[in-house]
Amino acid sequence: MNGERLVSFHSYQEMAEYYFKYVDLKPFNAFYERPGTLALLPGVSGKKVLDAACAAGWYTSWLLEQGAAVTGIDFSPNMIEMTRRRVGNRAEIIRADLNEGLPFIGDGSVDIVLSSLTLHYLKDWTTVMGEFYRILRPDGVMVFSVHHPFMDFTYFQRENYFLTELLDDEWETPQGKVKVQFYRRPLSKITADVLEAGFVIEKLAEPMPTEEFRKVQPEVYDKLTKRPQFLFVRARKT
Ligand SMILES: C[S@@+](CC[C@H](N)C(=O)[O-])C[C@H]1O[C@@H](n2cnc3c(N)ncnc32)[C@H](O)[C@@H]1O
């Protein structure tokens, strides 16, 4: 693992309990990211779904409740443990690094790939997009959410929008501050990497936070209605 990957690895190792206990209820997740991702998903009942990366297992659990057969992967052993704690052996939970491919998943064996708020931890999307394309059946669907390139560019006051660059951040958690690193890339790079893998982009969404968000955090809600934080994509294997 290179140095940059190590930082996110250790951050998520550290944050596993926090994710398990708190992230389900955080307005950014519950009332913004999750509604945005779920709105793009096709019906999942009876489908084989890859949750990449599952973190503490919220999507894995939701998918199981909807009647999907789920494989969840994550590179953090502590996150894997949290997902197992949540879903037991009802899903296949595997420790794997998305940078290194998914050799344990067969060609054309998955109906839906779901990847929420993870791809910005990967510098190069060639392997991951190629693998998502390979494991999907023809006509299969990939849905992902990532940090919005506009948000990362403005919030971190970067100079050159067209670069793909590593950014440093620090998150407040109940256990204290945690250092996080992720990649910002321009919108054209996001779409090019998806298209070059062979996908057709069906939808690119910048949804509003929900009414529940406004009730619990009106000021943040107001900001999100003017400045998008996440970008949502649905693409199909042709
Ligand atoms: C923001 S969390 C995902 C949240 C989760 N999808 C949810 O909504 O509950 C990002 C996850 O990506 C994982 N991750 C980051 N880089 C990864 C990589 N290269 N391979 C596999 N997992 C990775 C982290 O361990 C972490 O669990």
Image (cartoon, rainbow, N blue to C red):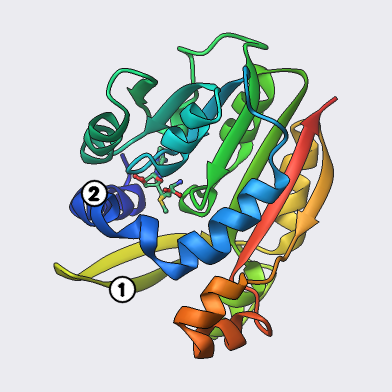
First in sequence, mark 1 or 2: give its number: 2
Tell me, for residue 89, which label it has, or none: none
Q: Amino acid at mark 2?
A: Ala
Whether disc 2's CB lies below 8 Å from ligand 1 is answered: yes
Asked if residue 32 lies left or right of residue 172, the reply is right
Tell me where residue 167 appears, x and y as whole percent.
44, 69
Residue 22 location, quadrant: bottom left
Ligand 1 shown in quarter: top left
Residue at 33% over, 36% down: 75
In the current view of this chain or complex, which residue is farthest to the bottom?
A: 219
Q: Is residue 17 visible?
A: yes
Q: Nearer the viewer, residue 17 or 195?
A: 17
Residue 236 location, quadrant: top right
Q: Nearer the viewer, residue 36 or 116?
A: 36
Label 1 crowding class (10 Å Cα cut-off): few <14, some 14-19, many 20+? few
Q: Amino acid at mark 1?
A: Glu
Q: Is residue 222 above or below residue 137?
A: below
Q: Nearer the viewer, residue 232 or 28?
A: 28
Asked if residue 175 lies left or right of residue 137, the reply is left
In the current view of this chain or complex, which residue is farthest to the left?
A: 175
Query: Judging from the image, what secondary structure is the residue with disc 1 in?
Result: strand
Tell me, for residue 170, which label it has, or none: 1
Tell me where residue 93 appears, x and y as whole percent.
35, 23
